Image (cartoon, rainbow, N blue to C red):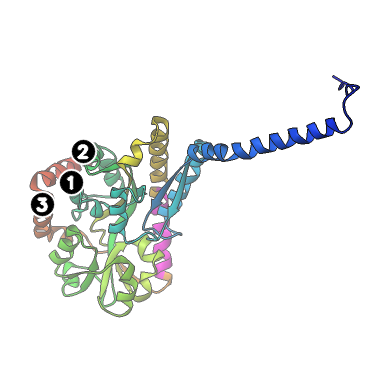
């Protein structure tokens, strides 16, 4: 529709003045409204902090990145995830404690870290109880998750999914390991976790606790002879640079458990909770696949770097674990240990 001409008889300059005033009024209204609009936009987006121990190149971080992208895309930006890898927010025990307190929203601790709050988790790392990764996944995704999740929630943590980390293996600077006797007398760094300490000591080694962040320096300075970790950690943290011997003992299975602060979880709506659970499960599947694929390649790279890899017969190692099982049961509770062994046996069938 064509605009009407200006009415006759209007005082000269009146139209211009009115238009100027109108623009000023609209501009003022927009300025006043902007903070409210920004406030609504900011309120609509929830940002979650995820801290973990994996290096940038590790499958754990790649899985976390996949989860971040999927959650942000599928929520249309309503949920955002900021990731802090490589222990940027503190050593693993500190990250978990901060998650429990709500300072950090989400974390990827190992079961060994979680057993400080719920003893059932101590049974997962009992030495030599899992046949292979598929056996471990069947246990941890099934009956164990049904058992452990409600217990963990009482401690203020919601269990979203069990990711991966891998079987632990022993490296050292002194000699190849083919039998339990080869471990005797070696000073082996372990985390302060009873299962790992008990395992090394049952083999005659001298377990020594050193913070993970200080491990490369301790190995370089000869404070300890060796350490034990999954192959991926050994490669990505370059621990092999001072450790010419790697024995694939696969003595304990380790996985990262995706947990979230319970209070923060309860502030999410049901759809957001379902989205997080689903994408955490997808991230777990990716990490498991990458750990399996990369371990083969990492072992090849370690050999190319001059590391001597031994693949000992594991039955003699398993046979030496009687004292270790007693110590784990004393820590975790005999009833918890018996229940876990029953679950493990059922999953073997």
| Residue 35: percent from left, percent from top | 56, 40
Left or right: residue 43 versus residue 345 is right
Element carrying mark 2: helix
- Whether residue 293 is visible, yes or no, is no
| Residue 132: percent from left, percent from top | 28, 50
Residue at 38%, 40% (x, y): give it: 281
Q: In front of the other: label 3 or label 1?
A: 1
The correct choice, above or below, for 144 with respect to 250 in the image is above
Left or right: residue 246 versus residue 44 is left
Q: Are marks 3 and 1 in contact (CB under 8 Å)?
A: no
Q: Which residue is mark 3?
A: 329
Label 2 CA crowd tier, 10 Å (few <14, some 14–19, many 20+): some
Element carrying mark 3: helix
Residue at 54%, 38% (x, y): give it: 41
Q: Quadrant of the N terminus?
A: top right
Element carrying mark 1: helix
The correct choice, above or below, for 247 with respect to 34 in the image is below
How far apart marks 2 and 1 lie (CA) works out to 9 Å
| Residue 287: percent from left, percent from top | 40, 49
Q: Which residues are magenta?
A: 289-303
How many discs appear?
3
Label 1 CA crowd tier, 10 Å (few <14, some 14–19, many 20+): many
Q: Quadrant of the C terminus?
A: top left
- Whether residue 306 is visible, yes or no, is yes
| Residue 34: percent from left, percent from top | 60, 39
Label disc, if present, on residue 120 of the rendered structure: 1
Residue 61 on the magenta span: no
């Amino acid at each position: 529709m064509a605009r009407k001409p200006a009415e006759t008889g209007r005082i000269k300059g009146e139209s211009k003045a009115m238009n100027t005033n109108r623009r000023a009024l609209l501009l003022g209204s927009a300025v006043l409204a902007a903070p409210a609009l920004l406030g609504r936009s900011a309120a609509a987006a929830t940002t979650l902090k995820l801290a973990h121990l994996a290096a940038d190149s590790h499958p754990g971080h790649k899985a976390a990145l996949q989860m971040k992208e999927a959650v942000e895309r599928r929520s249309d930006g309503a949920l955002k995830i900021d990731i802090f890898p490589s222990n940027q927010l503190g050593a693993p025990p500190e990250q978990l404690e901060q998650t429990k307190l709500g300072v950090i929203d989400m974390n990827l601790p190992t079961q060994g870290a979680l057993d400080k709050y719920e003893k059932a988790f101590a049974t997962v790392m009992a030495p030599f109880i899992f046949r292979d990764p598929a056996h471990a996944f069947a246990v941890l995704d099934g009956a164990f998750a049904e058992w452990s999740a409600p217990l963990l929630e009482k401690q203020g943590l919601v269990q979203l999914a069990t990711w991966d980390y891998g079987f632990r293996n022993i490296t050292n600077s002194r000699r190849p390991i083919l039998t339990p006797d080869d471990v005797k007398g070696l000073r082996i760094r372990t985390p302060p976790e009873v299962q790992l300490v008990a395992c090394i000591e049952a083999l005659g080694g001298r377990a020594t606790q050193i913070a993970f962040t200080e491990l490369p320096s301790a190995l370089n300075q000869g404070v300890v002879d060796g350490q034990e970790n999954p192959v991926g950690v050994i490669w990505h943290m370059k621990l092999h640079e001072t450790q010419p011997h790697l024995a694939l003992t696969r003595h304990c299975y380790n996985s990262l458990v995706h947990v979230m602060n319970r209070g923060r979880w309860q502030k999410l709506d049901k759809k957001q909770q379902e989205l997080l659970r689903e994408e955490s499960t997808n991230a777990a599947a990716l990490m498991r696949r990458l750990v399996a694929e990369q371990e083969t390649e990492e072992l090849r790279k370690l050999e190319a770097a001059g590391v001597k890899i031994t693949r000992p017969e594991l039955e003699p190692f398993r046979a030496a674990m009687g004292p270790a099982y007693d110590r784990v049961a004393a820590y975790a509770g005999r009833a918890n240990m018996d229940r876990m062994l029953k679950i493990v046996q059922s999953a073997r069938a």
